[in-house]
Amino acid sequence: MSLASHQETITQLRDEINRHNYLYYVLDAPEIPDGEYDRLLRELQSLEAQHPELITIDSPTQRVGAAPIAAFGTVRHRLPMLSLDNAFDDAEVVAFDRRVCERLAVEAVEYVAEPKLDGLAISIRYERGQLVQAATRGDGESGEDVTHNVRTIPTVPLRLMGSGWPELLEVRGEVYMPTAGFEAFNHRARASDEKEFVNPRNAAAGSLRQLDPRITATRPLALFCYGVGEVLAGTLPDNHFAILEQLKQWGFCINPEIRRVSGVAGLIEYFAMIGEKRAALAYEIDGVVYKVNSLSQRETLGFVSRAPRWAVAHKFPAQEAVTTVLNIVVQVGRTGAITPVARLEPVFVGGVTVSNATLHNADEVQRKDVRVGDTVIVRRAGDVIPEVVSVVLSKRPGDTLPFDLVKKYPACPVCGSAVIKPEGEAVARCSGGLYCAAQRKEAIKHFASRRAVDIDGLGDKLIEQLVDSDIIHDPADLYHLTQEQLAKLERMAEKSAANIIAALEQSKTTTLARFLFGLGIREVGEATAQALANGFGNLPAIMAADETRLQQTPDVGPIVAAHIHAFFQQPHNLEVINKLLAAGLHWSDVEVTETVLPLSGQTVVLTGTMATLSRDQAKERLQALGAKVAGSVSKKTSFVVAGAEAGSKLTKAEALGVEVMDEAGLLALLQRHE
Ligand code: IVH
């Protein structure tokens, strides 16, 4: 082949690879499987290896530069990178809009509303369509030259696509680490005893500030563009929204949640909409940004000191806050696990006042060395229980003492039984079993819960009241409650008492799997309970099985088998089971599936919403085929079913290369095997 024809093939391959990159990252609509993409890239690599003189800096093979750099250079921003004023509530947004309208002497303004990503601001310069320099924001006047690292980010074009770009184009945006990538990174770091990142923002910053681009290349970074800086010799549209659309055509990722909205009502509505979506987004945001759309209006408005008058950041309430530990107490859970809890000076975090935060277990308190009197950082993420993240050591008073859970609680604070912390385990437990009122309450709550025998309307508070007043001692006692007994309780109306009696009656018709799950045997979750029901068909067979026989059930290993066996050896447990059966709990025996089920050994994760199946229905049908349905994606996941608006689990699956199927794919699979 002549050099000219080599050159032509190479150019074609580069164009094709760039196009697939764009389809994949920007449009989210890949046309070829990953394997095919890799094949194209390898072909290009091999052609370039034969003709190194044809390698150009913007070739898709050249994302990772050869050598680490010695130190970061400084880049002066020709147009300063401004910051944003903040608004913390609706009133401040209304005030912002009023100022804008007054200065422009108009009734209402068109805005562009965007998620405010929690990453790192970046400026990337393109000369004649080629990436020439990337710099961090720094102090806004000058930042660090991180060109070598930014080039490794797959969503950053090395060469602009299409045509019509200005001679010089400076694009600005946010480099971020998607939540799934962040979690996977920390998971690996933990496993290899390396330092974890505190949050995705630090992870993005730390990854960009690497001297060796090969390290940055392994970090799952991405870029969303939100504007332009310097533009020379060329024109751009006269409004922000159209500029973003143009940038998308040149190959940049633009956040798909960005909207044009009108007036202040549009802003507030957008804020609520994004707030609701926030937990499902694949990346962390700390608020939204409102920007006047028209560039000429922006010019009229100008800026004050470091922030433009034409934009404002509407922040979500903080997710982390600083407060002090007033006391450390413990709670006893269903399995006797003793959980230390920090009682805090009440503090407003993530929209609510928090006065308790979990310290997880005996080892965690010791690792974080949290003490009464300490100043701590507490975090509240989504719906999860607030936790103590770390201690601000510089603020520790002189007279604090380490909190040693095992020393402080040799006996269970609820029942007085010995507390045991086996060697190598992080958790200390009360050994009282169902003798312990705390464990009894939790066991009864678990038995009555929706996924177990599902006693509608029997709330936690009511169960606690019933146990505390010695009316019930175990789940079976529930079925001897009378309407009169219930109606006598505090805050209980005649009607609710009747409803509970009816719900109890209804819960007697159940399934073997729900019943088994409801017993609360350690390590026996819903999937294991289902597997036991499928494998044995009836309760007496499970109760009589030895550990070896139990281990023939999918997913039952030696530890779980030992827990199951031990449970059925306990006279007290047998007594409760007999009482439940005598009270009338019943189910149809399950047909034993001797043959291996079609999806045995497969682990499936469901995410997003499906149009024809509820999550529970999909789960039940998959389990009936022998699959295990798990809550989180890992390398061991066989496949992920992604419905509409699938979020971080989908991103994680993609990051780990786990197979993903949509609802139609799932239905076809179920149909094939049912
Ligand atoms: S616009 C003059 N848009 O927020 C306007 N900034 O406090 C400059 N940020 O340094 C920024 N998402 O790192 C803009 N959609 C978005 C943003 C965003 C995140 C960050 C950016 C900037 C900081 C300003």
Image: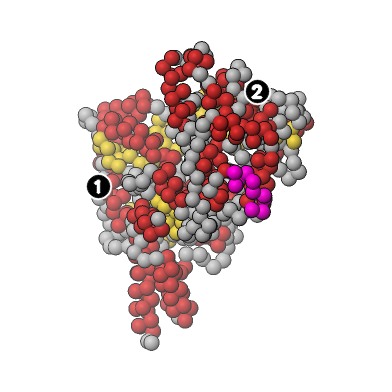
**The residue carrying mark 1 has its beta carbon less than 8 Å from ligand 1:** no
Q: Nearer the viewer, residue 204 or 573?
A: 573
Residue 334, horizontal then vertical, whole percent:
62, 33
Residue 630, horizontal then vertical, whole percent:
51, 48
What is the C-alpha distance between the residues marked 1 and 2?
57 Å
Q: Secondary structure at mark 1?
A: loop
- Amino acid found under the numbered disc labelled 2: Leu
Circle 1 residue = 238
For the C terminus, give its image quadrant: bottom left
Circle 2 residue = 326
Residue drawn at the location 56% of the way across and 40% of the way down: 516
Residue drawn at the location 29% of the way across and 27% of the way down: 98
The tag earlier along the polypeptide, 1 or 2, is: 1
Residue 324: mark in rendering: none
Q: Is residue 69 above or below residue 583?
A: below
Residue segment shown in magenta: 540-549
Q: Secondary structure at mark 2?
A: strand
Q: Quadrant of residue 478?
A: top right
Q: Is residue 378 above or below residue 117?
A: above
